[in-house]
Image (tube, grey):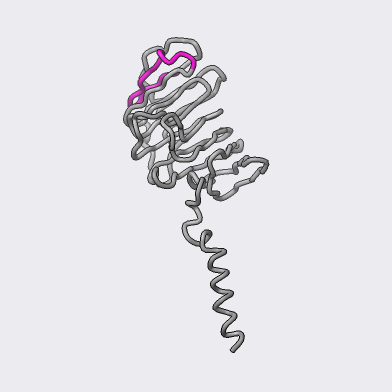
Amino acid sequence: MRHARVWPFLLAVLAGMFAPALLFPAEAKGAVGEMIVLKGRAIVIRGSRTIVVRRRLVLESGDRVRTGAKGKVQVRYFAPRRGSGFIATRNTVFVVREPIKRKKTYLLRLVWGAIRSRLTAFSRRRPYMRTRTAFIGVKGTDFIVYVKRKNASEFIGVEGLIEAVSRSRPEFSIRIGKRQWGEIVEGEKPKPPIRVPDSLWFPALREFSFPGDTPPAAPQ
């Protein structure tokens, strides 16, 4: 009889201890989204910790991620951005932020490498992504950003429209539409966007394909 009274008490205590982990553990406070490693591995710097990820990990606000030489990862945002996310390819470094709380807070900072973002919805009044040279505002759903030089950011529009604004010269901006390429170079007025040739367009869509996508084939 004594054990019959003790077990319900212990179960209640254990339930209280583990309930937060059992109920939607991926969407704990500060969680931004889930990262799935599609190829290779990724390194996550979280405060003083270094985490090697080979399969998947819930990313927290402030996490700095570096993909490997053969790496490719997908990040899927949690609410309120559920359904949106991005692909980062090899040798890419980025930092994720908690969902927007202030007017000028952005969700993603691309430090180096390349990222393709696909968004279902986003406020046009706020920047979505930041690079060393530009803020990227979203007026569409699908685009690729490259940082291959310290003083420049390049953009390819896949669907919809994005607007990139120079961080040092806010009066300098460029709008990139579907299958257009443009760049922001530090201290320079942007040139008009140009059409992406087949030799670059189709390989980019293959490289940055999301799981389940069937990238279009180049014309013969």
User: From what the image shows, is residue 162 above or below residue 214?
Assistant: above
Outermost residue toward the top in this view:
188
Q: Nearer the viewer, residue 8 or 105?
A: 8
What residue lies at 64% left-to-right and 40% top-to-bottom? 47
Q: Is residue 188 above or below residue 69?
A: above
Within the image, what quadrant is residue 63 found in?
top right
Which residue of the protein is positioned furthest toward the bottom in this rendering?
Answer: 1
User: Residue at left 33%, top 27%?
Assistant: 161
- Left or right for 123, reference 109: left
The picture places residue 16, in percent across and down from the top left corner, at 54, 65
* Magenta stretch in the rendered image: 168-183
Percent position of residue 134, x then y: 47, 21
Location of residue 37 with respect to 192 vertically, above or below: below
Quadrant of residue 128 within the rendered picture: top left
Q: Is residue 60 magenta?
A: no
Residue 129 rendering spot, x and y as whole percentages: 45, 30
- In the shown orientation, is residue 178 left or right of residue 66? left
- Residue at left offset 39%, top offset 27%: 137
In-front residue for pair 71/95: 95
Residue 13 shows in the view: yes
Q: Is residue 220 visible?
A: no
Is residue 151 or residue 101 the one in the foreground?
101
